[in-house]
């Protein structure tokens, strides 16, 4: 497709389980970003990739969060041992490269931890 | 204090009105300024992308940046019910990997 694609669109899981969220960026975009959107905190940066490297992981809230990108395309965000405070919408964006370019967002994964 | 402040609203206006949305920021290193529109249960959609101070117009939308006052605005002319959404300002600086810092969003409702 032409836009950023995220899956699943919704995920409900029990506290303590691991979850994997997937992002497929716009074709040809080398930079990929993960953000989290929650009611109290708004939209917050988590991590970004330029190619397969992650120069900035400063927004990851704890060591339970990790992300990888392979082949310069698809990225997965993994949350281990989920907690209720992890409930949020996880948004992925991509841009042509990581310098001064507009970012385009997917529709997100709505994660609910029971 | 947040780096980017935005009035959350809600803001309610009649159809056809001119809407003014604003953000203030504290980090003078920000150089790129964006406005996104977000409908319920959808991702943010880029409306305007501007660099440094000045105005930019695109159809019914005008973005203004005043770096001396650390203040940005989005004006919507002839507002329509389909403009009802949450509007997010965002900004970034060169050398920061292009990561965005967002305002909390203003909820807009345009009524018939």
Image (cartoon, grey):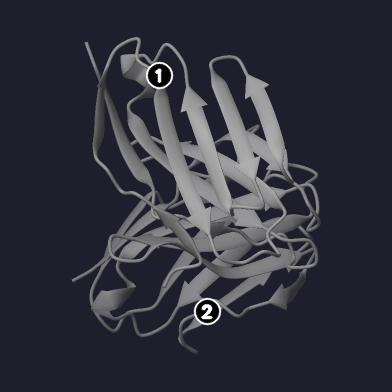
Q: Residue at x 66, y 67 (%)?
A: A48
Q: Is A73 left, or right, of A106 in this rendering? A: right
Q: Is B100 left, or right, of B16 in this rendering? A: right
Residue B43 appears in the rendering? no
The numbered dot on residue A61 is none
Q: Is B15 left, or right, of B27 in this rendering? A: left
For label 1, the SS is: loop
Where residue A16 appears, x then y in whole percent?
29, 84
Q: According to the image, label 2 marks what residue?
A: A60
Q: Residue at x 67, y 38 (%)?
A: B49
Where residue A67 appears, x then y in whole percent?
59, 74
Q: Considering depth in this image, is B55 or A88 the residue closer to the camera?
A: B55
Q: According to the image, label 1 marks what residue?
A: B18
Where residue B104 appears, x then y in whole percent?
39, 55
Q: Nearer the viewer, mark 1 or mark 2?
A: 1
Callout 2 crowding tier (Cα within 10 Å): few <14, some 14–19, many ≥20: some
Q: Quadrant of the N terminus of chain A?
A: top right
Q: How many marks?
A: 2
State which chain disc 2 sits on: A
Callout 1 crowding tier (Cα within 10 Å): few <14, some 14–19, many ≥20: some
Q: Is residue A46 above or below residue A104?
A: below
Q: In this view, which residue lies farthest toward the front?
A: B68
Q: Quadrant of the C terminus of chain A?
A: bottom left
Q: In this view, which residue lies farthest toward the left?
A: A114
The answer for how far apart the CA atoms under marks 1 and 2 are is 39 Å
Q: Are marks 1 and 2 in contact (CB under 8 Å)?
A: no
State which chain disc 1 sits on: B
For label 2, the SS is: loop
Q: Residue at x 33, y 80 (%)?
A: A82
């Amino acid at each position: 497709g032409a836009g950023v694609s995220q899956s699943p669109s919704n995920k409900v899981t029990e506290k303590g389980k691991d979850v994997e969220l997937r992002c497929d960026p716009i074709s040809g975009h080398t930079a990929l970003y993960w953000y989290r959107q929650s009611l109290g905190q708004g939209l917050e940066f988590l991590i970004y990739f330029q190619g397969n490297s992650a120069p900035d992981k400063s927004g990851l809230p704890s060591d339970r969060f990790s992300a990888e990108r392979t082949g310069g395309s698809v990225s997965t965000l993994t949350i281990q041992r989920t907690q209720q405070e992890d409930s949020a919408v996880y948004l992925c964006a991509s841009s042509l490269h990581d310098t001064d370019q507009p970012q385009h967002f997917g529709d997100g994964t709505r994660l609910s931890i029971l | 204090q947040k780096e980017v402040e935005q009035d959350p609203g809600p803001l309610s206006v009649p159809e056809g009105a001119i809407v003014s949305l604003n953000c203030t920021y504290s980090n003078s290193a920000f150089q790129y300024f964006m406005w996104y529109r977000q409908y319920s249960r959808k991702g943010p959609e880029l409306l305007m992308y501007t660099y440094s101070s000045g105005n930019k117009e695109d159809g019914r939308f005008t973005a203004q940046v005043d770096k001396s006052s650390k203040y940005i605005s989005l004006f919507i002319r002839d507002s329509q019910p389909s403009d009802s959404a949450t509007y997010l300002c965002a900004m970034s600086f060169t050398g920061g990997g292009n990561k965005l810092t967002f305002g909390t969003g203003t909820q807009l409702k345009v009524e018939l």
